[in-house]
Amino acid sequence: MEAFSALVLTSLSLLQFILGTKATTLTIVNSCNDIIWPVVLPNSGSPPLSPSGFPLNPGDREILPVSSGWSGHVWARTHCATSVADAKFSCTTGDCGSSAVDCGSSGGGILSPPATVAEFTINTPPFPDTYSVSVVYGYNLPMTVVPPGPAGSCATVGCSVNFASANSAAELRVSYGGGNEIVGLKSACEAFGEAEYCCSNSNGSYSSSKITCKQNSYSELFKNWCPHARTFANDNTGTTFTCEAEDYVVNFCAPPTPNSGYPYNLTGGTGYL
């Protein structure tokens, strides 16, 4: 009996080892030519990370440990400032609603579009992690998600839009500095607020039906610019990727690499990796 108990304990220990938690990190990199304020916020039921919002100067990076079972979103705020009148912090794109640099304070955790968003679910082994890049909430910065490892083992995915080439979507533009600088593109939902673009209405039929919640002329524009990004709520084909990496690099304005069209500048070239 003792031998059997020892065998059971050994088997349980081995199972815990095999299925145990893993050490994973999110590395946030600023390759842009200006300061940005990244946001890392959990989905409901996942623990918050610290910091949840922070400034990141050009060339800097922030490394955040993430536990198994965590899921959430990463994006960056741009053109931010603290008001002299009320000392509240706000951003032109990607504001998180906290009125502060940190997004975990009271009132935080609400994305104010537009923003390019990375979505993660860090699973417990042997189940792979999932990740994607989304422009469902519009677009403000070039972004790549890079799972380091042997070439070809896990996909690098991203989105980069040249604002100068987005003339066909002038009604989606977000400007800064008196309209002289284009700093983002709204989603059609944000721009027009119509159920067919937002995939939601009072009875929820748009959000639950693939017949009514489908690609439209504006999501097609984003899909042409960023073929592997999610462009509307039901855009789930070929947009979610899996990997078992120990680190995921979220790089804003990633510099050009082989087979990459990503720019250094906020408003650089087009392409995806």
Image (cartoon, grey):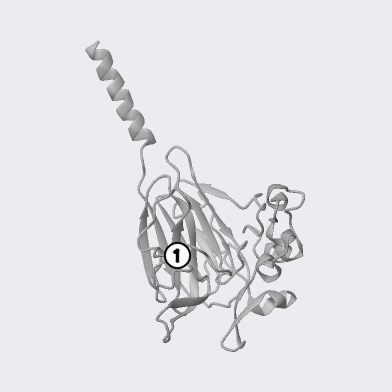
**Residue 87 placed where, x, y %?**
40, 81
The image quadrant of residue 188 is: bottom right
**Residue 225 location, quadrant:** bottom right
Q: Quadrant of the N terminus?
A: top left
The residue at 48%/75% (across/down) is 32
Give me the residue at 54% from left, 62% from top. Answer: 117
Residue, far top: 1
The image quadrant where one finds the C terminus is: bottom right
- SS assignment at label 1: loop
Instruction: Give whichever of 52, 169 is nearer the camera.
Output: 52
User: At label 1, which amino acid type do we have?
Assistant: Gly
Residue 153 is situated, as x and y percent measured from the top left of the image, at: 50, 48
Q: Residues within 10 Å of mark 1 (few under 14, many from 20)?
A: some
Q: Image point 64% across, 63% down: which residue?
A: 226
Q: Is 13 positioned to the left or the right of 102 in the image?
A: left
Q: Which residue is mark 1?
A: 108
In this view, the residue in front, 140 or 171, is 171
The residue most toward the left is 2
**Residue 151, percent from left and from top:** 49, 53
Q: Residue at x 66, y 80 (%)?
A: 164
Q: Quick check: 46 left or right of 173?
A: left
Query: In the picture shown, does residue 218 fall above or below 83?
Result: above
Residue 269 in the image: state x and y as whole percent: 61, 74
Work out whether 21 lies above or below 92.
above
